[in-house]
Every structure is written in C-alpha cells, then in structure tokens.
Image: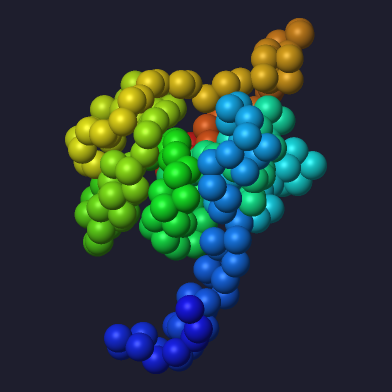
C-alpha cells in the first residue's frame, strides 16, 4: 500500500491512511508465534498501550490494568483485545488482518450511541461498532444495562459473552474514617468530565 489518489481517495487522505496502517501486518503474528504456547498473548491494537505509570481516561483505563496480567504484545500475540471506547485507527483493517493470521478477537463493549447524546449520525457510529462486535469470538459487557443497550442498538453478539463489571480497588477507593462532613454543599459527579455535556449536567444539577 502506498499513498496515492485512488478510487476518489485524495493524496492527503492516502498519506494519512498510510501512516495509520503502515507496519500493521508486521505487528500481527500468526497463532503460535508466542513460542507455541497455548496461554493467551494479547495485542490491544496499539503499538504502545497506556501503562499504569501514565495518565489515561475512558476505555484506555481498562488497558492500563489489563497489562498487569497480559502485557501488550504486538508481533507475538494470538488474541486481539479491543475496547469499543478506545479503538485504534482503522479497526476493521486490523481485525481483518488478524483474522487472516488466525488470531481471535475479544471485544469489550461499553456504551452505545443514541440520539439524545450523540445527535445526528448516531446510527452510523453504532453500525461500525456492531460490525466489529459481530466478528468477536468473545464479548465482555461492563454491566447488565450495557448488554441490554447493546442488544437494542447493536443487535446480539455472535460469539460467547458475559457481563464482567468494572472492578474497583477498594483498598484505594473507600469511605474516609472518620466520614467527611463538609460545611458547604458537595456534588459528586461520576465518570470523567472531558466531554462538555457531562460538566453541563453537573452544573445544572447543582443550580
């Protein structure tokens, strides 16, 4: 593949596609490349997945902690593990290449798009997720609600699946002793606030 004007693809877009996918096949090894071992070796779709020594957010947080047990192994993996909210560039190309090399796809399904949140084109976002999820050998849902929403907006998965709630480190996140009793009103906003609507909802609630 080389940057070129082909099938309506501009030269600039061609160069960008080349940068995103260059070396992709080299990062994927056939099953058994991990020394012929049967235990899982995992590639998260990123040449360098975020580690615990860095700052992360959203679906990338899952990759940080998963690497404790399953280090990111591009070039020596038999499983591709993708998180729906932390997808690498051109995930369809990656999954197709992995399938040709006998690798299995494990899919972690988080939220879905819907009109009230995403606005126009929400169906297209769900369509892309659904096409990938249907190619997975195994699907993890982070909650029963997540499974319900996924089945409604994406359709049922083809492979096996289970609900695996997001874990909480209770040695770090726990009530203070003695309990904090602030003099001022305190509002607790769950999740991250890097998206505008999440901050707006908290501010309107406080008002």
- Say left or right for 26 vs 52: left
Q: Residue at x 73, y 14 (%)?
A: 171
- Say left or right for 85 vs 145: right
Could you tell me if residue 49 is visible in this image?
yes
**Could you tell me residue 23's position as x and y percent?**
60, 67
Q: Residue at x 73, y 20 (%)?
A: 172
Q: Residue at x 68, y 28 (%)?
A: 69
Which quarter of the picture shows residue 73?
Answer: top right
Image vertical order of residue 168 relative to residue 135, above or below:
above
Which quarter of the picture shows residue 148?
Answer: top left
Q: Residue at x 76, y 8 (%)?
A: 178
**Could you tell me residue 160's position as x and y percent?**
33, 25
**Could you tell me residue 200's position as x and y percent?**
45, 48
Outermost residue to the right: 53
**Could you tell me residue 52's position as x and y percent?**
75, 38
Outermost residue to the top: 178
- Say left or right for 122 vs 14: left
């Amino acid at each position: 593949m080389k940057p070129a004007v082909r099938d309506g693809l501009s030269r600039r877009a061609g160069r960008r596609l080349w940068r995103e996918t260059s070396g992709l096949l080299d990062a994927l090894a056939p099953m058994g490349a991990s020394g012929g071992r049967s235990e899982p070796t995992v590639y998260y779709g990123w040449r360098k997945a975020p580690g615990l020594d860095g700052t992360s957010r959203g679906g990338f947080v899952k990759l940080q902690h998963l690497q404790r047990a399953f280090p990111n192994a591009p070039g020596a993996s038999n499983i591709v593990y993708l998180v729906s909210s932390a997808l690498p560039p051109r995930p369809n190309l990656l999954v197709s290449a992995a399938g040709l090399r006998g690798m299995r796809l494990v899919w972690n399904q988080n939220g879905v798009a819907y009109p009230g949140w995403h606005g126009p084109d929400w169906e297209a976002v769900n369509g892309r997720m659904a096409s990938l999820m249907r190619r997975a050998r195994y699907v993890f849902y982070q909650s029963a609600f997540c499974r319900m929403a996924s089945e409604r907006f994406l359709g049922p998965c083809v492979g096996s699946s289970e609900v695996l709630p997001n874990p909480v480190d209770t040695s770090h996140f726990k009530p203070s002793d003695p309990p904090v009793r602030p003099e001022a009103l305190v509002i607790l906003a769950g999740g991250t606030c890097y998206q505008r609507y999440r901050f707006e909802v908290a501010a309107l609630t406080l008002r």
